[in-house]
Structures are given as C-alpha cells and as structure tokens.
Image (tube, rainbow, N blue to C red):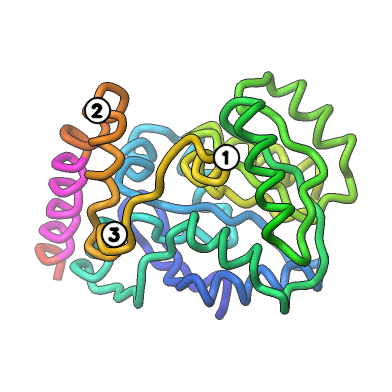
Amino acid sequence: MNPRAKFPFGVTRCSPHSIGDLLAELKLLLADKSLTPRTILCLNSHIYNMACADDGLRRCLNAARIVAADGMAVVWAARFLGHPISERCNMTEAFHAFLKDDTMPRSQGVLIGCSSAEAEAAAEKANRDSPHCRIVKACSGFLSESEYKEILAAHPESDLIFLGMGSPKTERLAELAAQVCPQAVPWGIGGGTIRIEAGTMTEAPVVWRRLGLQWLHRLGSEPRELWRRYLLGNPRFVLRILSLAWKRRASQ
C-alpha cells in the first residue's frame, strides 16, 4: 500500500491501513532503512479533538508515514465522509500481531511510556512473546526531553522506538526519535498497550472492541480520569464530523 495514500480527515490526514497493511509496511521499513518517512502514529476521536487546537500535534500527525484509524469513531466518521476504511487498526492488536509474526526480520527496539515498572514489565513480556524482536531498553514516559535524547542517542542501532505516553507527548517524542535515530521506526503503540502488556490494565473483550465500545470499557475502569475525555469529547467529535460533512455538501 502506498504510504502516502492518506486521505483528508478534517484538520488531519488518516491512513486506510488495516492491521495486515500496517504489518506489511513495517516489514518494508525494517528491510529498507532508506525509506522515509518512517513514523507510525494513530488517530482516535480524542487525538483528533486535540489536533483541532494544537498546531504541533497536527504537524506531527501529518508528517507521519501512517496515521492509523485506531478508534472506531474515526472508522465510522471516515466512512460517513466518503473514505471507506476496511477495519479499525487497533494499536494493541497490531503490536501483538507484530510480536508474533515470525515472518518479520529480526529487530531490536526501545520502549518508552507509563511508569518505569510498567515499561520494564511490558518489555519483558514482549521479549518472551516475540521470536524476532528484542526490546533492549525500557524507560518511563515521564522523563525530560533531554533525558530522552540521551537515551535514544545511546541506542543508535535501534530498529523500532515503541511509544506510549499519551497525546501529544507521544507524537512529539516520535518527532524527536526520528531526528535522533533516523533509521528507526518510531511507533506510537499507546500507553494502554504498554499497561496491558505489563498486566496493570485489562483489555476490553473482543466483542466490545469490534462494536466500538472499548471506550466504554476504559471509562468504566477509570471514570475519574476519563469521564471528560469521553462524555464531553465524544459529542464534540461527532459535532465536528457533522460540521465537516455539512461544509463539504454545501460546497458541492
């Protein structure tokens, strides 16, 4: 799939990649270090809402090779706007599929996100699960930019930089990683992915994920932290998509 085949999605651009497409692209990137851009990010309703007010976040998203539709709301909205996406490209499922894909070339990486203990536990599990990828460094998602520069510079041989720090920090660190380790693939796998790997968060049941109800599972698990994001953010996202559709039809 052409990595530049992203389509306009309001203030950002989105990629139509399925998990299989993303894995195929990863295989190409690992085999050919000259391919650019190399960053893989994702888009959901929360990230889109933030991008509407954050120029830097929009820049990071639009410069990435892939901006996968990680949220079902984005999949539905894209279809509503005339850009059909075959399936949701859930980053947790994509990460698990990558780790277990024995056709991938051998690689090593750095994992950054959540607490130090969670990052280390996630790295240990990933190393047990994967026949081809070894995470050689895992660290907290709460360090300074200068500390991350030092960590990345100490691992110039890294093939992958796995990031899960929340937005817009993930996207900005992906931009930094691309500068410090230009041959690596910065991949925003999400803080939830790291916590699931570490065993500090439960993954939503498959049925809930397929129905687009993963957000409800997370809201039930962390109501105080997430009520504003979902109960206020989801309606705001819907209104923005309806506004896009109205403007598009009015201009035709």
Q: Quadrant of the C terminus?
A: bottom left
Specify whether 179 is left or right of 73: right
Q: What residue sits right under mark 3 in the picture?
A: 72
In percent of the image, x 80 and y 50: which residue is there? Answer: 182
Q: Residues within 10 Å of mark 3 (few under 14, many from 20)?
A: many
Specify whether 147 is left or right of 214: right
Q: Quadrant of residue 53?
A: top left
Look at label 3 and name its amino acid: Met
Separation (CA) of disc 2 from disc 3: 20 Å
Looking at the image, is 145 positioned above or below residue 234?
Answer: above
Looking at the image, is 10 positioned above or below residue 234?
Answer: below
Q: What residue sits right under mark 1 in the picture?
A: 198
In percent of the image, x 33 and y 51: which residue is there? Answer: 204
Q: Which percent across, then down, holds residue 207?
A: 26, 63
Look at label 1 and name its amino acid: Ala
Query: What range of the chain is rendered magenta?
Result: 234-248
Closer to the camera in the image, 241 or 91:
91
Separation (CA) of disc 1 from disc 3: 24 Å
Q: Which percent across, then down, holds residue 157?
A: 89, 50
